[in-house]
Image (cartoon, grey):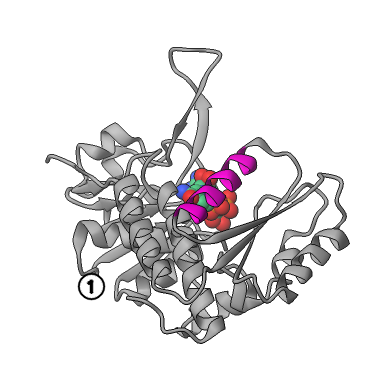
Amino acid sequence: MTSNIIDGRAIAAELRGKVKDAVSKLESQPRLAVVLVGEDPASQVYVRSKIKFTQECGMQSVERRLPATATQEEIVETVRALNNDDSVDGILVQLPLPEGINSDAVIEQIDPSKDVDGLTETSAGRLMLGKSGLRPCTPTGCVVLAKSALGDLSGKHCVVLGRSILVGKPAALLFLEQNCTVTIAHSKTDNLPNVCRSADILIPAVGRPEMVKGDWVKAGACVIDVGINRVPHPNKPEKTRLVGDVAYNEAASVAGAITPVPGGVGPMTIACLLRNTVLAACARRGWKTPE
Ligand code: NDP
């Protein structure tokens, strides 16, 4: 079967275009605040691209940088100050925070109306209860990608591989919201290949390079690979490369649709963050949410 590659970069660019269009119709520019603690190189790259895309969409960005030595209290104070700043619509704390910092306690300080990453207990609870709210960005991106390949997801069997708070659990709830029949698999699941093979939509979010083999994928299934793993380059010992949780070439020859890594889920995460910032600004300011 010829595999259909889902172009996450193109779909993310389209979504950013919609966000930009929506922003141009608002009374004023939404503002996203990003809190970055420490010097982690990957986090710095993520924050730079979040700020770049925020500005490209016509929104304002504020960056709050703290040193790696910042205390829990200093980080919490920074978040509280952003909560109290009425000009700020969205707050994102870049994870991971340095060792010794209680990330959950920091995230919990974010005003839920500004929780554009959808990670506070209030946002998670509202998702669980089926109430409107800001949804986590990566799982939302997975749903958008699956719909781009399959259209209506109703009745499809979706297997989410992974049960983290950040990805697996919210992804399962979001696919349930789309009327999928959802299975959540994890490290204690028996006969994982068989469970995966039963999926119409397979969402590996494990963090294990190329764990999902071609014969774990049902012919014609839609595979949305969330994993981002840095591994040694096969031919250049001094270099590394990024791979997903799926053995891409094997799986691509079986799947009906599949996301590459990089260029699949990654770009969608930022696009969904930008959309959440618009949604947060509209809800906070009583503006009608643009289409
Ligand atoms: P976590 O480490 O928090 O969770 C991993 C999950 O995978 C756990 O539920 C764990 O099960 C399960 N798991 C681990 N090993 C196995 C195994 N051998 N068999 C079955 N299940 C297993 O990771 P995250 O959810 O935060 O991230 C997952 C991946 O997604 C990572 O590669 C991360 O880099 C990537 N990611 C990508 C994003 C993007 O924008 N594209 C954003 C966020 C994450 P158990 O609970 O039983 O331990």
48 part of magenta stretch: yes
Q: Position of residue 94 (x, y in %)?
A: 65, 53
Residue at x 33%, y 38% (from the top left corner): 213
Work out whether residue 273 or residue 192 is closer to the camera in this orientation and state it.
273
Q: On the picture, is 121 further left or further right than 10?
A: right
Which residue does the numbered mark 1 point to in the structure image? 155
Amino acid bearing label 1: Gly
Helix, strand or loop under label 1: loop
The image quarter containing residue 158 is bottom left
Q: Is residue 137 above or below residue 50?
A: below
Dot 1 alpha-carbon crowd within 10 angstroms: few under 14, some 14 to 19, many 20 or more = few
Q: Position of residue 80 (x, y in %)?
A: 77, 71
Q: Is residue 266 above or below residue 117?
A: above
Q: Main secondary structure of the magenta part?
A: helix
Q: On the picture, is 66 further left or further right than 87?
A: right
Answer yes or no: disc 1 within 8 Å of ligand 1.
Answer: no
Q: Specify the segment rendered in magenta.
A: 42-56
Viewer can see residue 188: no
